[in-house]
Image: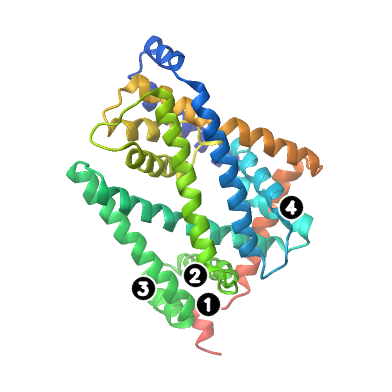
Amino acid sequence: MKKKVLLGLAISLLFLYLAFRNVDFASMLEALQGVNYWWLLPGIGFMFISLAIRAYRWGYFIRPLREVPFRKLYSAMMIGYMANNVFPLRLGEVMRAYVIGRSANISKTSSFATILVERIIDVISLVVILGITIFFGEFPDYIQKAGWLIFTFAVSMVLFIILLMEKTRATLRFVWILSSPFPTRIKKSINRLLRKFLAGFEVFRQTSQYFTIIMQSISLWLLYAGIIYVTFIAFDIEPAHSSLFVASLVLLVMISIGIMIPSSPGFVGTYHLLCKEGLALFGVGANEAISFAIVLHILNYIPITLVGFYYFWKENLHFKDALAEKEVVEQEIAKSADLRPLPEQVDKE
């Protein structure tokens, strides 16, 4: 655990250095002083509307397990987001599973599976946005090629997930054969990961609200883009060779990639560098870009963390218990995955 924490800290420090190395701090402060901060208020509104929609959407995933009131869903979700901002090791998802499991009397493994499905759908939605922005935007050739490569890979993954759900035994057996050159330990790890995917999508398969979930997912990403959009206005930035809307979508994709990179709590460093590099695509200078990244990060960090702490206190949780629960939940998830037979065992049944 300590090694992972130190690795995340080292990655954040490296990305912070890369983000700030060409910045003139006097010019950065000047850019910060010129911001019309009133424009950030709609951004905060967009953020909490998106969080409410996300909680409602999570309710559809959890409904096959149990009907859970919105209040409990929202509380667990905000605690999870706060935990990602404050605790190391991406504790948020595990904390969220623990809190909803405790408050709604749902198994931690099942609740974690619903969160896994949510993340997969988010990634798929993000890649769709990437394809749309590449189609409508004007970017250098290497960015377009990289974007289409990622888009093609994501479509392939979606098709693979569909096959995994509809033709489970055949797909698991096929993956087992493909991984035959690797040691058995690695093959079992791959298979265990696939079984975790299956556990999550079993819940998704039991809901009939597909259209509602899709519309909620689209609304979420549009609201996230809206937060970036009003930040552009606050800084009075006109993106080169693009509309504000397309630039907001591109920056959303870049920041989301930054958040996926392992780092210290709150995605410090990775968030800032990817935001800065995304703005550079639209001709924004380093000083103004890093100022933009700082403001946008704070805008997303402070309100969520404060509300999350409120619910953390209201649920009577403790920091040491949170860290202990991470190991407990992860052990339960691993144990549940181990209960499913390997492909070679399936063939013998």
Pointer 2: what residue? 191
Rounded to the nearest whole Å, what is the CA distance between mark 1 and mark 2? 7 Å
Which residue corresponds to mark 3?
A: 178
Tag 2: amino acid: Asn
Dot 2: within a 10 Å radius of its alpha carbon, few (fewer than 14), some, or many (20 or more) residues?
many
The numbered mark, 4 or 3, whose residue comes first in the sequence reads 4
Q: Which residue is mark 1?
A: 342
User: At numbered mark 2, what does the secondary structure look like: helix, strand or loop?
Assistant: helix
Marks 4 and 2, how far apart at CA: 33 Å
Residue positioned most to the top: 26
Q: Residues within 10 Å of mark 3 (few under 14, many from 20)?
A: few
Residue 13 versus residue 160: which sits nearer the camera?
160
Separation of marks 2 and 3 at Cα, in angstroms: 12 Å
Q: Earlier in the sequence, mark 4 or mark 1?
A: 4
Location of mark 4 (residue): 72
Residue drawn at (33%, 38%) of the image: 247
